[in-house]
Image (spheres, rainbow, N blue to C red):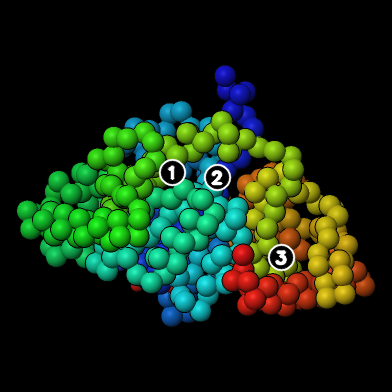
């Protein structure tokens, strides 16, 4: 039986939402890091990829008693910027999205970029979970660190519960006006997906985080037999081309299927046509750390999907120069494509 599940890849999960709804903070809360505080003006300017190993998710969902039957290796979660001027970055690579988390601020409801994302999700026919973040902003909220949301709500005074219900009802109506049926996830008795699940959370003290992870796990369990079976055909998309300290110009990619190996031949586009070269180093951040954070990288001989990977070019010869040039050109090209086609 176990063997049947050996070749599953990790689902790729995009976290989307209007600026400042708490996307990065939610990931920080799951990772136990603080990326958000280090960002210029608190605004996410790049796409980051983090691998969440399944053991960690099992641990965090323990209280909800769900981890037993899960066979995916983990989740690859991709953070995106909500700021309007980054709309090109948001759609880049989103075709590899298996499931999305759409974050809404419970105090603000649906906002401009929420609607933009709903359109992108619709276009990609992507499944998604809605997170109603910042429940601690409800007047008089009593913190229950890392508690499942039902338990946390039970601890609240009547007035808090009433404000919660009123805001939830209002937001469900707002989604309905966008043509989307939504429901508080633990009231959802339907097995089919006519209703999108809503999970209330607080990214500061972690209420509702176990529930969010549980829903991701349940989604994965449902999709394991079709969508998540590993295939040897390489599916890989470029997120960013940039200079990384100690590694020269590098390409950040998401590998969604297949293997990449050190020494593999790769082809990048240049202004004067394709440029053929080799992978010098395959680098990943340590699990639970993020690809865009400066930290010692792990080197790999071989990497299996799904993973966020930093690729660097061969050292010190003409080839490196040509690769660096190719990558620089690629960055220019990507910007152009983004400008012309909204990055799709
Ligand atoms: P962009 O990447 O710029 O689109 O923003 P974001 O969605 O990643 O939001 P971010 O994580 O940067 O959080 C925005 C602000 O909201 C920060 O000041 C956070 O500390 C705060 N914040 C995020 N989540 C919560 C929450 O659950 N409760 C409260 N009270 N504040 C939160
Ligand atoms: Mg952010
Ligand atoms: Na922000």
Asked if labels 2 and 1 touch by Cβ distance under 8 angstroms, the answer is yes
* Residue depicted at 62% across the width and 68% down the height: 343
Upstream in sequence: badge 1 or badge 2 = 2
Q: Position of residue 200 (x, y in %)?
A: 28, 53
Tell me the crowding category of disc 3: few under 14, some 14 to 19, or many 20 or more residues within 10 angstroms, Cα based: many
Pointer 2 residue: 11
Give coordinates of residue 183: x percent, y percent: 28, 47
Choose top left, top right, bottom left or bottom right for residue 295: bottom right
**Disc 1: CA contacts within 10 A as few (<14), some (14-19) or many (>=20):** many
Residue 36 in sight from this viewpoint: no
Give the number of the disc on residue 251. 3
Task: Determine whether the residue tagged by mark 2 lies in a helix, strand or loop.
Answer: loop
Which tag, 1 or 3, sits closer to the chain's start?
A: 1
259 above or below 319? Answer: above
Rendered-image quadrant of the C terminus: bottom right
Q: Residues within 10 Å of mark 2 (few under 14, many from 20)?
A: many
SS at mark 3?
strand
């Amino acid at each position: 039986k176990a063997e049947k599940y050996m070749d599953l890849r990790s689902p790729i999960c995009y976290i989307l939402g209007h600026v400042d709804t708490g996307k990065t903070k939610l990931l920080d809360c799951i990772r136990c890091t603080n990326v958000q505080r280090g960002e210029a003006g608190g605004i996410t300017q790049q796409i980051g990829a983090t691998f969440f190993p399944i053991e960690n998710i099992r641990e965090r969902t323990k209280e909800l008693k769900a981890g037993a039957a899960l066979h995916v290796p983990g989740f690859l979660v991709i953070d995106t910027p909500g700021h309007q001027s980054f709309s090109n970055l948001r759609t880049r690579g989103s075709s590899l999205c298996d499931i999305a988390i759409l974050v809404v601020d419970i105090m603000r409801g649906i906002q401009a970029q929420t609607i933009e994302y709903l359109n992108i999700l619709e276009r990609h026919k992507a499944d998604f979970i809605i997170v109603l973040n910042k429940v601690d902003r409800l007047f008089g909220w009593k913190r229950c660190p890392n508690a499942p949301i039902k338990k946390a709500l039970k601890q609240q005074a009547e007035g808090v519960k009433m404000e919660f219900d009123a805001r939830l009802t209002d937001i469900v109506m707002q989604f309905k006006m966008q043509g989307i049926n939504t429901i508080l996830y633990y009231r959802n008795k339907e097995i089919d997906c006519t209703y999108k699940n809503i999970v209330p959370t607080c990214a500061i003290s972690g209420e509702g985080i176990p529930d969010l992870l549980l829903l991701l796990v349940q989604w994965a369990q449902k999709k394991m037999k079709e969508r998540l079976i590993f295939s040897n055909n390489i599916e890989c998309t470029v997120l960013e081309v940039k200079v990384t300290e100690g590694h020269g110009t590098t390409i950040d990619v998401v590998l969604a299927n297949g293997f990449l190996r050190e020494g593999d031949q790769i082809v990048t586009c240049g202004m004067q046509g394709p440029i053929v070269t080799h992978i010098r180093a395959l680098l990943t951040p340590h699990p639970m750390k993020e690809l865009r954070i400066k930290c010692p990288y792990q080197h790999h001989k071989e990497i299996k999907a799904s993973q966020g990977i930093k690729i660097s070019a061969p050292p010190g010869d003409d080839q490196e120069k040509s690769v660096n040039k190719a990558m620089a050109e690629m960055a220019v090209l990507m910007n152009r494509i983004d400008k012309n086609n909204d990055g799709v």
